[in-house]
Image (spheres, rainbow, N blue to C red):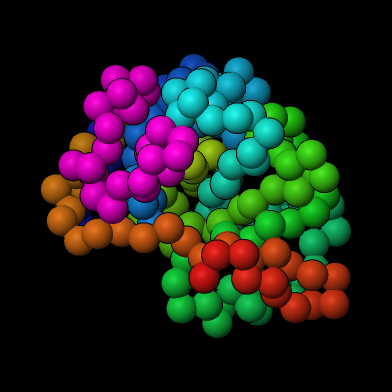
Amino acid sequence: MVDFNNDIEQCLKVLRGGGLILYPTDTVWGIGCDATNEKAAERIYKLKKRLDNKAMIVLVAEERDVLQHIANPDLRVFDYLEQATKPTTVVYKGAIGLAENIVGKDGSIAIRICQDDFCRHLLKRFRKPIVSTSANISGKPVPATFSGIDIEIKIGVDYIVNYRQDDAIPAEPSSVIKWNKDGTATVLRP
């Protein structure tokens, strides 16, 4: 097993202090912060030069984390996710306990239960959801590897994870679905 404990410890210090991390996820490299900290989320919007009316994705470690942050979720979504063949982000209605500026104007939030070892360790140790937005300036292509991340992003965060910086296999963003009241999914991004 790869030792990423030092990275986890550094990330925890930064996240608890309201800072930003640049980290590998189960999909592309992400810019992250405490998903309950509005000021930290504002820093991400500024760094990405992104309008703050665009909601951001939040990562959690387990199904029960979704239940803590969504009012009355349809539990059938978890069966759907078990069948998914790639990381899938779900847009839920009724976000609770998250920074207001990462939640959509309609009260929706995009959440992904992360299966990546590094992220799961980080999320479990942090005990809160973490924002994960692609590590690019808004409007520019999403980098497929760490080496493709713009220097402006690297300079703008408080800690860059060392783990997986050498990965040469191009990563892809997650699928995104909206879960409907009738128990079906509308695919927003395949």
Residue 148 lies in magenta, yes or no? yes
Q: Is residue 73 left or right of residue 91?
A: right
Which of the 4 image quadrants contains residue 117?
bottom left
Q: Residue at x 55, y 65 (%)?
A: 189
Q: Quadrant of residue 56?
A: top right
For residue 170, above or below residue 45: below
Tell me where the magenta segment starts and ends, as one range: 134-157
Q: Residue 17, how many percent across, how many down?
A: 49, 17
27 relative to 3 in the view: left or right: right
123 drawn magenta = no
Horizontal placement of 108 versus 144: left or right? right
Front residue of 79 and 2: 79
Instruction: State whether residue 164 is above or below residue 49.
Output: below
- Relative to 101, residue 172 above or below: below
Residue that sits furthest to the front in the current view? 139
Q: Nearer the viewer, residue 56 or 137?
A: 137
Specify whether residue 51 is in view.
yes
Residue beneath the point at 45% across and 39% down: 139
Residue 28 horizontal/vertical position (percent): 36, 52
Q: Nearer the viewer, residue 189 or 179?
A: 189
Residue 11 seen from this side: no
Quadrant of image for the N terminus: bottom left
Give the residue at x 75% y 37%: 97
Determine the residue positioned at 61% across, 53% down: 111
| Depth order, front residue of 142/62 | 142
Residue, far bottom: 83
Q: Position of residue 142 (x, y in %)?
A: 36, 47
Q: Residue 47 placed where, x, y %?
A: 45, 23
The correct choice, above or below, for 120 with respect to 81 in the image is above
